[in-house]
Amino acid sequence: LSAAIAITEQPVSVSVPVGYSFTLRCRAEGRTSLQYQWFCQHQSVCHQIPGATKQDLPITAQQTQLYTCRINDLYKNAVFSDWVKVEVHQCVARGVPPRLWRGEPVIVLNPTEQRVEVGKPLQLQCAAMGVPAPSYQWYRNGNLLEHQKKKKLWITHAKVSDSGTYLCCASNSHGEHWTNAVDIHIGKQSQPMSHLQLCLSVFLSATGKIALLVGNNHYQHHPNLMAPVTDVFELSRLLDQLGFQVVSFLD
């Protein structure tokens, strides 16, 4: 019976910088002596780790992988430990984590400020190192978001009420660390500016000389002019060369 073997200590997931050395641990009890064998999985390919036949598996982190340990007894009973993730951060700023790091959470990716149109998806992302791997909890305007407990916060269809200040807390048995707080703006798509609004914005932002050109071609009580469009174009080019900001209207 598989119950003949009881795992008393499961390995735990970690989140570490590349090159970091640590140990995965597994402990079990059985009616006979026990044999251990570790396995790893990377990109859906699982294989036995040669020589990894002890309770402890020393690792120098190189790439993100999953690990499990198989325990056998002399009666051919076998059980597997939980699968654990060793998440490896390839690009970590110098000095992070600090030299005397004991595994407390260290934020390595902060969320960024965003403006999102109503109905479009909102995604915020953060990441932290930690031994054991940190758990995550997102907050908006200081209020805990019940279902947002992953590195990525995902809202499929953003509403105006989703606007606010977001931040995330990464925590493990050694403590907690908070990301930066970021402002998220959810609003309706802004309409393109009319020609009049565009001209007004030029006037409001302009410094120096401004020229307003109006070329009228159609008059109610006057014959049509020969070439006001061409005149406005030529004049605007000339005034532009003289350092004017030019706003042109036709009819």
Image (cartoon, rainbow, N blue to C red):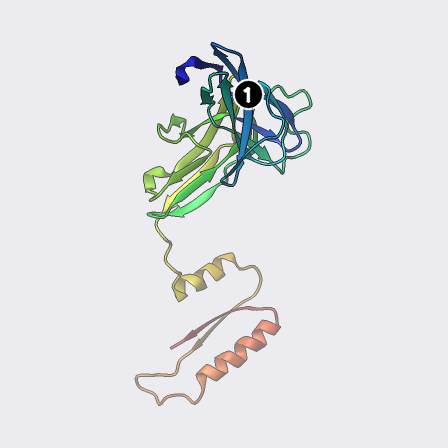
Above or below residue 110? Residue 199 is below
Q: Is 171 in front, or is 218?
A: 171
Residue 174 seen in render: no
Residue located 41% across and 26% down the image: 142
Tell me: 102 left or right of 163: right
Above or below residue 181? Residue 79 is above
Query: How far from the left and from the top, in percent, is residue 112?
Result: 50, 40
Residue 221 seen in render: yes
Query: How far from the left and from the top, in percent, is residue 195?
Result: 40, 66
Quadrant into which the N terminus falls: top left
Above or below residue 213? Residue 189 is above
Give the residue at the far left of this rendering: 220
Q: In which quarter of the image is residue 99?
A: top right
Quadrant into which the C terminus falls: bottom left
Under mark 1, the amino acid is Tyr
Q: Callout 1: 10 Å neighbours few (<14), some, many (20+)?
A: many
Above or below residue 15? Residue 191 is below
Q: Mark 1 = which residue? A: 36
Query: How far from the left and from the top, in percent, is residue 180?
Result: 52, 32
- Disc 1 is placed on an element classified as strand
Query: How far from the left and from the top, in percent, is residue 100?
Result: 67, 20
Residue located 35% across and 90% down the image: 223
Residue located 45% across and 21% down the image: 79
Q: Is 70 in front, or is 90?
A: 70
Q: Is 34 in front, or is 40?
A: 34
